[in-house]
Amino acid sequence: MSTEDHPAEPGTAPAPPRSLAEDLRSRPDDTLSALLRTRPDLVTPVPADLTQLATRAATRASVVRALERLDRFALQTAQALAVAPDPAPYEALLTLMAGEGEGGDRDPAVARALPAAVTTLREQALLWGPEDRLRLVRTARELLAPSPQHPSPTGLGPTVAEAAAGMSSARMQEILTGAGLPTTADTVSAIVALTALFTDRARMSALLDEVPADSLDVLSRLLWGPPYGQVTADPAPRLRALLDRGLLLPTAPGTVVLPREVALHLRAGRAHREPRPLPPAPAAVATHRPQVVDATAAGQAYTALATVEELLKAWDGGGPAVLRAGGLSVRDLKRTAVTLDVSEPVAAFWLELAYAAGLLASDGEAEERYAPTPASDEWLRLPAAERWTLLATAWLSATRTAGLVGGRDTKDRTLAALGPGLDRSTAPEVRLRVLALLAGLPEGAAPEPDSLLARLAWERPSRGDRAGAEDLRARLARWTLTEAEQLGVTGRGALSAHGRALLPPAPGEPPADPARLLAPLLPEPLDHVLLQADLTAVAPGPLHRPLAEVLGVLADVESKGGATVYRFTPASVRRALDAGRTASDLHAFLAQHSRTPVPQPLAYLIDDVARRHGHLRVGAASAYVRCDDDALLREILADKRSAGLRLRALAPTVLASGADPAALLEGLRAMGYAPAAESAEGDVLITRADAHRTPPRTPPAPVPEGPPVPDATLLAAAVRAIRAGDRASTAARRTDAADPSGSAEGPPGALPRTSAAETLATMQAAVLTGESLWIGYVNAEGTASQRVIAPVKVEGGFVTAYDHTAEEVRTYALHRVTGVAELAED
């Protein structure tokens, strides 16, 4: 029962809580909501009462998850509590964190920050109890306390009592004599006496004054950890001096340990060498004008759009095959990198970005291949700024991590682009946090990466806090900085205005529109090109999509950049003719969209290819070639390059081939001819370069890190349900005068047990008197619960009642009521 339900008598202090459940029971609803918000695993499913909530909050998996989400100083505070006495007064904790002494002898920054760290631990149900009896949750204490297998980040070892457990009484008496203490009758009292000596500042200082200087050097090497050392069977005199006085205690043959009490004395009571009460601030290495940053980021954004468009175009007719285990082969990744003119890691990033945005997927066919999705066509029709916003938001929320491509999984298998094993649930959180830290710098300021990583490491220390080890969060942060620059979220290392708009708005502020901020910075699409006499066309900027699509078929891209250079070749012109264009169409198209006259060499090229195009006709025999010019067919037969096509003459104007029509077309084109495919009716077949799309595909869903954070409505409902369940489980039952112990109904807190006749009679009486009852109920799924109800009507084997637990009127089957008891009068 909470102290609010039963206030203490005037002049007396409320009794301290005896468990975490009692501590939670005394907390207000907003504190419980904060607990469930920061530890959402506790609310899935909603606990029946506060006892169940406390039990769940103390489970190992939940405590590990909560510890991993603490900042460095809060974690250091928990680590200090793990080596403190249990329970520990606040003053003892302050000594462990800020050192012994008062005033100037203690670190003022630590002393100021410690109350907030204690509050954080308390809010997350890792700590409970009043200020004079602080208790770390037992599971957290077991995880953080030092042991030979799992050394503590504090560098402290076991206590004297822990290290001396199992030591013979004779050896303990020898240590007491060496330390200048009187001998005792048993080992327990000897350990108590030695502990008292080591925790007495004056006596301990006097003992250390007797130790040789070289022996003190040994202690200094073990002082900040690890506290274990190796000794021989015949220790040197400097070690013998320490062993004889108990300043080093043996833990195993050949191994000694520095007792915790001795280390704390030498450390002036500090548990940590460097407490970190304040987060390090990211340092700026350069500052640019915001306009320069935005313009640079917009240029990168335009390049990002062009790269993704080129990727979709390259895979438009069907991309590479999907590996049996999923993903893209190393060879196909290299080919894609060559196509995009980037390195393989960068190509993997663009592939994963297009996949996360739902623009690429596997087609699901028997011979599975990658291809653009139908959503990619819709994406291409959007304005450039909106297309970029879709890419950036997909990147920000994706858990797939391109930086892992090429690495190894836990089974030593290579991680492939677009394959399984690339999801990291912390990636979206790290990306958002990196952008938030960039947004906290002055506009135009580019951070020093190591200082940014140091800030992230303070906010979320790696498990074990290993020095020199870069954990996944640090690698994710480095990848985020690189990817943000490639995508155009940042420019010259600083956050752009449209990149800042990607962050969630502050409370009460409307969300910003990145597309609106980016659109004025992107170049306007052009409706013209500049034709040149060397069979090239220069696009001085981005082209309108219809113009770019036709030009992409009619010419090959020779170089990219601020201006794109297209080259016209016989093969590219033939490609346009195969797509159904005529020579007159191409002449009119170029004349319409060129700011310069159509060069004569280009006009000749189009006419020459058009004149030869379709002169040969290829159809299905297995395949055949027909031509009105029998001399041309004889020329083909005589050409040694046609041997692989297995051609033979059927008639003066017809050749038959053992190859299929597609192979025959490619073979003749490779020989320099311009054949056209024809249908069974003799009509020319128009081949277009479009056309392979996957079925409708949704983007890959991010893999969450544990249960999602509940919203305010769910939190309020969960807290009400927990409170109501707790009232039901702790409600006092009226005891019978003949059985004042309440044993007829069961022990206090247990589900009531009554016969069916008693249950019915008590329900009917409560309907008449209007009293509330405490019932045990088993639902259709077999789940037992305790509820407090006010019966309104009993009929037909059911009771209709106001359920105080659920705060609504419900109907219960009487045969499922395990028992009923009247509530005690207040």
Image (spheres, rainbow, N blue to C red):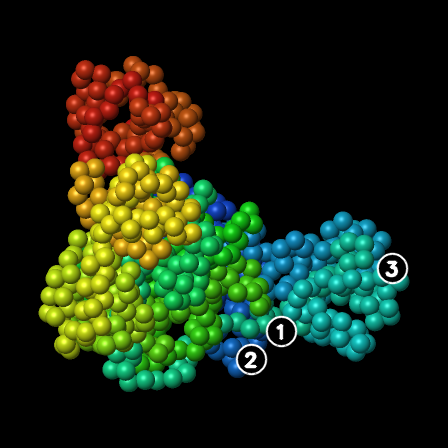
Q: Is 227 left or right of 49, judged from the image as shown?
A: right
Q: Residue visible at 53% across and 69% down?
A: 97
Which of the 4 image quadrants contains residue 444?
bottom left
Between marks 1 and 3, how big is the CA–CA gap? Answer: 32 Å
In front of the other: 394 or 203: 394
Q: Is residue 677 visible?
A: no
In front of the other: 157 or 645: 645
- Residue 255: x and y in percent read 77, 58
| Amino acid carrying mark 1 in the image | Ala
Which of the 4 image quadrants contains residue 749?
top left
Q: Nearer the viewer, mark 2 or mark 3?
A: 3
- Look at mark 1 in the image and give the residue it sits on: 268
N-terminal of the two: label 1 or label 2? 2
- Most extreme residue toward the right, as rendered? 234
Q: Residue visible at 36% across and 28% down?
A: 784
N-terminal of the two: label 2 or label 3? 2
- Tell how many labels: 3
In front of the other: 680 or 820: 680
| Amino acid carrying mark 3 in the image | Ala
Q: Residues within 10 Å of mark 3 (few under 14, many from 20)?
A: few
SS at mark 3 in the image: loop
Q: Nearer the viewer, mark 1 or mark 3?
A: 3
- Residue 359: x and y in percent read 28, 53
| Amino acid carrying mark 2 in the image | Asp
Between marks 1 and 2, how big is the CA–CA gap? Answer: 10 Å
SS at mark 1 in the image: loop
Disc ID at residue 105: 2
Which of the 4 image quadrants contains residue 10?
bottom left
N-terminal of the two: label 1 or label 3? 3
- Residue 516: x and y in percent read 17, 69
- Look at mark 3 in the image and give the residue it sits on: 233
